[in-house]
Amino acid sequence: RIELPEIEALLSQHPTVQQAVVIAKEIAGDKRLVAYLVPQAEAAPATSELRSFLKQQLPEYMVPSYFVVLDKLPLTPNGKVDRKALPDPEHTRVEAEAYVAPRNEVERILSSVWQEVLNLEKVGVNDNFFELGGHSLLVIQVHSKLNNKLLGINRDISVVDLFKYPTISTLAQYLGQKQDVNAPTRQKSNDRASKQIEALKRQPLIKQRKKTNG
């Protein structure tokens, strides 16, 4: 359950924010939380700073996907905030760092799935899924798509992993480490299976020889 007034009240407590309004808005066919704020001074607060501030007291799914800075909030004739007059956020890629293209097969798979789910043209390996507009419901979609695509290269992923590693680079690194840790176990299983198969192949020959000798 998302309480918009709770998010607004907390956001208003930030020292750089004078006023704040949060609404759920449909963007690219999906409901996203959008925060509109009027800063205390001319310099607008950094989005990353606001996200970090909110995450200290709110779960990930209650942190807005977009932050829009306005000179003033639109008002109705009664002096209340005119929520219908709030502008659409620019649906552009959030770049905290310079774009870095995927460097291997796993990163390319992760990037393609994120692009599809987030409806973006490109996603760099250092981009944060939640800062690009992702939320808990989209995480479920990503989880389903990734497990299907990673199955062919012996990788598996959990929903918790997607929250713990919100960038492609950190998630790919985690999957690589997981693969290395599981490799000896998988090799032992494969060796065991091979021995069992060979034993089954020899069984008819052994029985046949005994019958012949008899």
Image (cartoon, rainbow, N blue to C red):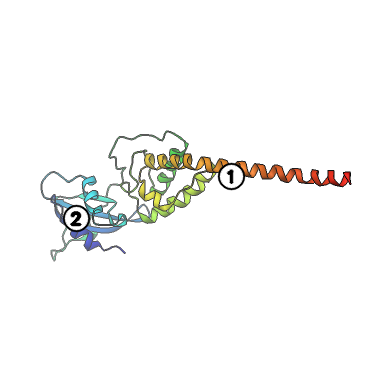
Q: Quadrant of the N terminus?
A: bottom left
Q: Where residue 83 is drawn, which disc sits there?
A: none
- Residue 187 is situated, as x and y percent measured from the top left of the image, at 56, 40
Q: Disc 1 or 2, which lies upstream in sequence?
A: 2
- Residue 61 is situated, as x and y percent measured from the top left of the image, at 32, 56
> Where 8 sits versus 129, above or below?
below
Q: Secondary structure at mark 1?
A: helix
Q: Is residue 77 left or right of residue 183?
A: left
Residue 48 in view: yes
| Residue at the far front in the pictured view | 214
Foreground disc of the pair 1, 2? 1
Mark 2 surroundings: few (<14), some (14-19) or many (≥20) residues within 10 A: many
Residue 121 in view: no
**Tag count in the figure?**
2
Q: Which residue is mark 2?
A: 11
In the rendered structure, which amino acid carries the disc numbered 2?
Leu
Q: Which residue is mark 1?
A: 189
Indicate the quadrant where residue 19 lies.
bottom left
